[in-house]
Image (cartoon, grey):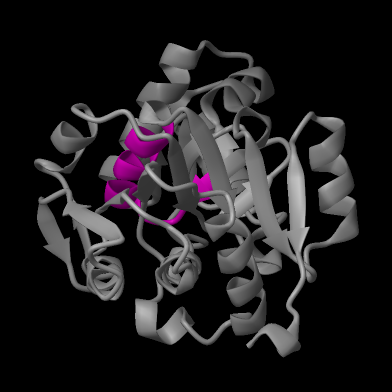
Amino acid sequence: MPPALRRARMLHALRSRDFVRVHDLGEMFGVSDVTVRGDLDALAAQGEVRRVHGGAISLATAPTERSFEDSSTDNAAEKLAIGVAAAALVSSGDVVALDVGTTTMAVARALRAREDLEGVMVLTNGINIALELERAFPRVTVVVTGGTLRPLQHSLVQPLADRVMAEVNPDLALVGCNGVHGERGVTNINLPEAEIKRSMLAAARRKVIVADGSKLGAITPAHLCAAEDADLLITGASAPEAVLEDLKRRGAAIEVAHFNQEEW
């Protein structure tokens, strides 16, 4: 098949799916992964696709990142419940890596409310999360990673942020995401933030993903980890049962947090 025709058909395949892996395209067109990468690089140079870890997405179907403020009211009750469940995993003396996002902000608020905690250190790349937890001082000490500010999420990314992560060994990483899928794993919409999330997960002794039910079954560009590689996924009551069952079959440990209005 001529390269131009193969690339046109690859583009068609990409536009009909959320994400396609290099290996899958190689099998589809009977070519090597090296050839596929060259084709994708050519399509990316033409502005047709975005290259992401392990594959590519079509820019015609690429998801749009929303601001923290725009997404903060989505599934708010679920996020509160997830925040309480995640904060319950923290013990006095723990070092906790807590990344950016509206669900992780719910975790931060639940941590601030835990007056029983002492000597907790929270490492975060979220400026708004740092300010939230400042109110828990001296029970909670906050370390901010540093880096370049992304105003959309009030987050700090490269350079510098991963260097800080390389120097610590958190007891627990509490990481948000935009998608959890049985086959595609845990994914995130923003590539620079995904790098920090992966660093947090790699450094921590215990890895916990927090994601409200709307994220389950979704696939976004940047791969973080396989769902079963996390020690626990905490989600909400709206999570699709079929997705939960698929994740469990693959070995994922899941907790469904339920909102109790009497607690608030």
The residue at the point 58 percent across, 20 percent down is: 23
Say which quadrant the C terminus sits in: bottom right
Q: Is residue 227 above or below residue 131?
A: above
Please state which of residues 135 and 131 is positioned toward the viewer in this rendering: 135
Q: Is residue 166 above or below residue 96?
A: above
Residue 22 position in % (x across, y down): 52, 26
112 vs 255, left or right, is: left
Q: Is residue 264 visible?
A: yes
Residue 69: image quadrant is bottom left
Residue 37 position in % (x across, y down): 40, 23
The residue at the point 31 percent across, 61 percent down is: 139
Please state which of residues 183 and 98 is positioned toward the viewer in this rendering: 98
Please state which of residues 36 and 86 is positioned toward the viewer in this rendering: 86
Residue 31 position in % (x across, y down): 56, 13
Residue 257: image quadrant is bottom right
The range drawn in magenta is 187-201
